Amino acid sequence: MKKTLLIVNLGTPDSPSYWSVFKYLRQFLSDEKVLDINPILRFLLVNFIICPIRSLSSSKTYKEIWHPEYGSPLLHNTKELSKVLSDKLPNIDVRYAMRYQSPSISSVIDDILLDNPDELIILPLFPHYAAATTGSVYKEVSRCLSDKWVVPKVTFINQFYDNPLFIDAWVDKAKDFDLNHL
């Protein structure tokens, strides 16, 4: 059985420029799962108030953290995570996508379906379920698959905060620090 694991992170601008950050913020904040208000009000607020103002300050912040070689830390770390998962799961094809911007869920799913997997496992990288994160990923994956003629079995992992292995990983990490002073 051929399986593909698609890990999905939130997203990041394609570059730290004003317009790239504007585009990212517009896509992110236009999502009704993120900003649950009247659609007309959301459009006006996002396009004429939030994005023009926040893109300026956010682009400065992105420039401070942007790596000259690999760009966005979030994208780089997600790529690295997919490589580690590929090594640890040799019988599963591991891919990654971003909910907002590149690589998009839509483009990655199109590529995955070319390989005709038997099962597609969707893993949003958010431990707790929230409509604005995991719910938005679910909605986008469903939208992308809804117009396909052939769809593999889809398994959606909607939360993992209570998985014993996840908890053990946090405990192991916490042991590296002196937590007695907290």
Image (cartoon, helix red, strand yellow):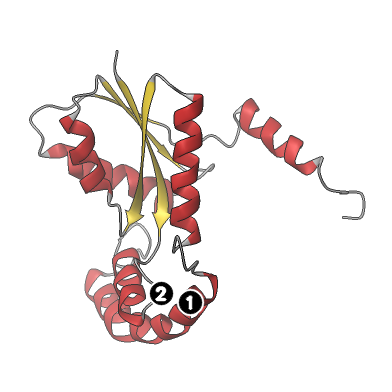
Mark 2 secondary-structure assignment: loop
Q: How crowded is mark 1: few (under 14 residues within 10 Å), some or many (20 or more)?
A: some
Distance from the alpha carbon under mark 1 to that under mark 2: 5 Å
Q: Residues within 10 Å of mark 2 (few under 14, many from 20)?
A: many
Question: Residue flagged by tag 2: what amino acid is it?
Answer: Pro
Question: Residue flagged by tag 1: what amino acid is it?
Answer: Lys
Q: Quarter of the image for the C terminus: give it.
A: bottom right
Residue 16 tag number: 2
Q: Quarter of the image for the N terminus: give it.
A: top left
Dividing the picture into quadrants, the one containing residue 127 is: top right
Task: Give above or below for 92 relative to 12.
Answer: above
Callout 1 touching callout 2 (CB < 8 Å) = yes
Among the two numbered marks 1 and 2 on one chain, the one whose residue lies closer to the N terminus? 2
Q: Where is residue 19 in the image (x, y as percent from the top left)?
A: 30, 79
Q: Where is residue 71 in the image (x, y as percent from the top left)?
A: 44, 64
Q: Compare residues 73 and 120 and report the one nearer the observer.
A: 73
Q: Where is residue 64 in the image (x, y as percent from the top left)?
A: 54, 76
| The residue positioned farthest toward the right in the image shown | 180
Q: Compare residues 140 and 97 and report the one nearer the observer.
A: 97
Question: To which residue does mark 1 refer?
Answer: 63
Task: Give above or below for 63 relative to 109.
Answer: below
Task: Give above or below for 125 relative to 4.
Answer: below
Residue at (27% x, 47% y) in the render: 105
Residue at (48% x, 73% y) in the render: 62
Mark 1 secondary-structure assignment: helix
Q: Position of residue 11 (x, y in %)?
A: 39, 58
Residue at (19% x, 43% y) in the render: 144
